[in-house]
């Protein structure tokens, strides 16, 4: 999730709930540049939590330097690459990158074949189901198979849908039935019950959880059965305050100034949709200084009412 799954958040997740793998934000490729990847993106792509696989997301197309960028990433020690074919925002849908790749499916296989020769670990694709037609994905599945990618992550919405409506996991099931590689289901998993339902419905090899986990990082362990169901009221606020306190400390170490630190924290708070925490979250988002946010979090950690 661009702007959110930075190394600060990954550190907190990796040391508290230990997902099976962590994904970076997009490495943005700069077309025509002698250095197609920025130093900032190199830092993000090479900062790992020990013991957890880090999958680096690249976005772009062959003509925009994705192959060259991947070669540079691998030279810096990156092992796992994921090609994004789903981003619904900005220029990614106006060129042959992100969700825009659906406009030229014939370009996908040659690029993935080149990447397959470069990437030492897993090579995967994260995709939407199409731009405006969810059946468009079946035009590119042969390219995924021919390039022998290791797994496919399917967010069963179209690019046009962005995050509206519902992910069509009947389509995910159809994809699982059609191809031999592992398929990871993505979209609309925010609770243990939803996770179980999606796995049962799709037969997927696993789940990728984004927004649901950002709002409730213990969701991974709740699904595994190693953490209790999500609490409510004061206990839920205390749980969230502990999480946000860890994030705040992590962000203070890598970002600069109250405005930047709080912008990152507030982007996480914005994804917390618990009705009984709405007023508290609104109070957090109103704060303009790290110290005042810290006070609110400390109060929640000790408040019994």
Image (cartoon, rainbow, N blue to C red):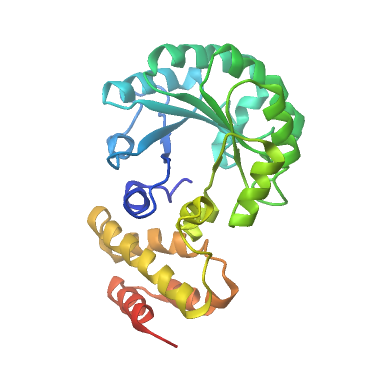
Q: How many numbered marks does the figure carry? A: 0
Identified at 37% across, 36% down, the residue is: 54
Vertical side of 249 occupied by 7: above or below: above
Q: Is residue 188 visible?
A: no
Q: From the viewer's perspective, is 15 left or right of 170?
A: left
Closer to the camera in the image, 285 or 219: 219
Closer to the camera in the image, 38 or 182: 182
Q: Position of residue 171 (x, y in %)?
A: 74, 35
Q: Position of residue 106 (x, y in %)?
A: 64, 14
Residue 133, quarter of the rendered image: top right
Q: From the viewer's perspective, is 146 left or right of 43?
A: right
Identified at 23% across, 56% down, the residue is: 253
Q: Position of residue 177 (x, y in %)?
A: 71, 26
Residue projecting furthest to the front: 225
Residue projecting furthest to the left: 253
Closer to the camera in the image, 70 or 217: 217
Vertical side of 189 occupied by 283: above or below: below
Identified at 31% across, 79% down, the residue is: 295
Q: Position of residue 203 (x, y in %)?
A: 66, 35
Residue projecting furthest to the bottom: 305
Residue 108, quarter of the rendered image: top right
Q: From the viewer's perspective, is 66 left or right of 252?
A: right
Q: Is residue 139 visible?
A: yes
Q: What is the quadrant of the C terminus in the image?
A: bottom left
């Amino acid at each position: 999730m661009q702007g959110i799954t930075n190394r600060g958040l990954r550190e907190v997740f990796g040391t508290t709930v230990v997902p099976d793998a962590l994904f970076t934000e997009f490495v943005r490729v700069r077309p025509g540049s002698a250095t197609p990847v920025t130093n900032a993106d190199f830092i993000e792509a090479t900062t790992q939590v020990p013991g957890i696989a880090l999958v680096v997301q690249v976005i772009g197309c062959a003509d925009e330097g994705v192959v060259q960028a991947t070669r540079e990433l691998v030279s810096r020690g990156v092992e796992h690459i994921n090609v994004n074919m789903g981003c619904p925002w900005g220029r990614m849908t106006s060129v042959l990158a992100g969700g825009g790749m659906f406009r030229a499916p014939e370009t996908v296989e040659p690029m993935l074949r080149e990447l397959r020769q470069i990437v030492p670990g897993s090579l995967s694709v994260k995709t939407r189901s199409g731009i405006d037609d969810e059946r468009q994905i079946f035009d590119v599945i042969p390219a995924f198979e021919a390039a022998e990618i290791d797994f496919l992550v399917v967010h069963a919405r179209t690019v046009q849908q962005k995050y509206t409506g519902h992910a069509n996991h009947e389509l995910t099931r159809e994809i699982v039935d059609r191809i031999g590689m592992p398929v990871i289901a993505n979209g609309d998993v925010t609770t243990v019950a939803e996770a179980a339902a999606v796995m049962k419905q799709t037969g997927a090899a696993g789940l990728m959880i984004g927004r649901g986990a950002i709002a409730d990082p213990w969701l991974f362990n709740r699904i595994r059965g190693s953490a209790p169901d999500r609490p409510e009221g004061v206990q839920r606020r205390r749980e969230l305050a502990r999480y946000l306190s860890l994030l705040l400390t992590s962000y203070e170490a890598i970002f600069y100034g109250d405005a930047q630190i709080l912008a990152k924290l507030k982007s996480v708070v914005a994804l917390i949709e618990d009705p009984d925490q709405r007023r508290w979250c609104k109070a957090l988002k109103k704060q303009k200084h790290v110290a005042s946010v810290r006070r609110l979090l400390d109060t929640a950690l000790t408040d019994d009412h």
